[in-house]
Image (cartoon, grey):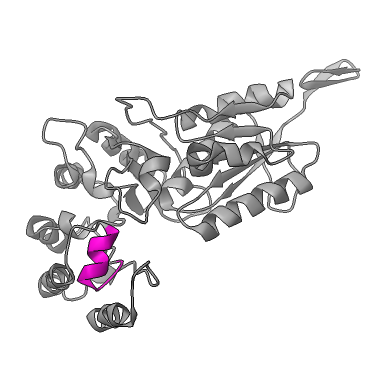
Amino acid sequence: MKETGFWVVDGFEKTMQKTFKIVTLGCKVNQYESAYLQGRLQDEGWKPVSSGESSDVTIVNTCIVTQAASHQSRQEIRKAIRENEKGTVAAIGCYGQAFPEELRNIKGLRFIAGNVEKSRVPDFLLSAVDSGDRVDFSVPFPRGMCFERMDIKKFPGRSRAFLKIQDGCESYCTYCIVPFSRGPYRSLPLDNVLRVMENLAHEGYGEVVLTGVHLGKYGIDLGGGENLKTLLQAAAGEKLPLRIRLSSLEPGEIDEELIGMVASEALLCRHFHIPLQSGDDGVLKKMGRTYSSHTFAELVKKIHDSIPFAAIGADVMTGFPGEDHRAHANTVALLE
């Protein structure tokens, strides 16, 4: 005899444990959100399975930041459909937010969601699996949208934890789709950030990476003068047994005060990741960037002067429309 959700064997009920796997593409923010989804599904009694195993649900947390990322997202979705003919395949995240119509054309895809109310994906999935219906939860960003809390207890498979404290971007660089897929600025309130950091320290994580879509804009929507520097000052006051690493920050958001904090606070990793994109001022202007090659070079020099052994990473694009050999040579010269 079979009942929904249970097998009845010799008078005893045995729960049929649902299985799932998550395929994550793209940035640290996506990785954080996938960790949240895994925790929520496990709290509901679902069992994670490894890549290559069949599952009741396969979630593809998509990325569209480049054409290659979009292609890979579609590949992973179709692969999941082939490997799980009887299961539910869900495509969530940036692809579903920006181009839901493209996902609707993929045969066998039963669940589509964007980045609005992403924390409720587990709830929607639970009902979708039982009903067998196709679910399409890709909706525009509402006006005045607040930060969507996704507190995590653990970060599976990693020795250090990511912590998403900010979402959204309003820079609209000419090459970038992120503002359309991630929406307006929104931030996790400072007290909530500190509590999650405390929980992660309690779980034994020695390092937490603060991440966001536009991390330097943390607090801009909260009022009360909260920003990334006040958050770091508050974290230092907590005396937590961990290190804090900052993910990518725009050049104009790294000032002498922040450099001084990283130089003096043992809590902070001596590491900056600073998007450059181009070392040619003409290309930077076409990109809609708000700094010059000279100001970028001066910033790197300030960091090096204050923290000689600081690690500095950068993003660089080549082949931007209108970039000629001379512009490319300017970028190479700046890096050298």
* Residue 121: x %, y % from top left: 54, 30
Could you tell me if residue 19 is visible in this image?
yes
Q: Determine which quarter of the picture holds residue 197.
A: top left
> Which of these two is toward me, 259 or 93?
93
The magenta-colored residue range is: 277-287
Q: How many marks?
A: 0
Q: Which residue is rendered at x = 31% and y = 66% of the image?
A: 277
Asked whether 140 falls inside the magenta stretch, the response is: no
Query: Where 4 falls versus 115 (above or below)?
Result: above
Asked whether 281 falls inside the magenta stretch, the response is: yes
- On screen, residue 227 versus residue 203, left or right, reads left
* Residue 64: x %, y % from top left: 49, 51
Q: Which residue is rendered at x = 77% and y = 48% of the image?
A: 82
SS majority, magenta? helix
Query: Where 187 falls versus 159 (above or below)?
Result: above
> Which of these two is toward me, 31 or 295?
295
Could you tell me if residue 270 is visible in this image?
no
Query: Where 67 falls versus 121 (above or below)?
Result: below
Quarter of the picture containing the C terminus is bottom left
- On screen, residue 182 versus residue 97, left or right, reads left
Q: Which residue is rendered at x = 57% and y = 24% of the image?
A: 123
* Residue 286: x %, y % from top left: 27, 61
Q: Which residue is rendered at x = 44% and y = 37% of the image?
A: 152
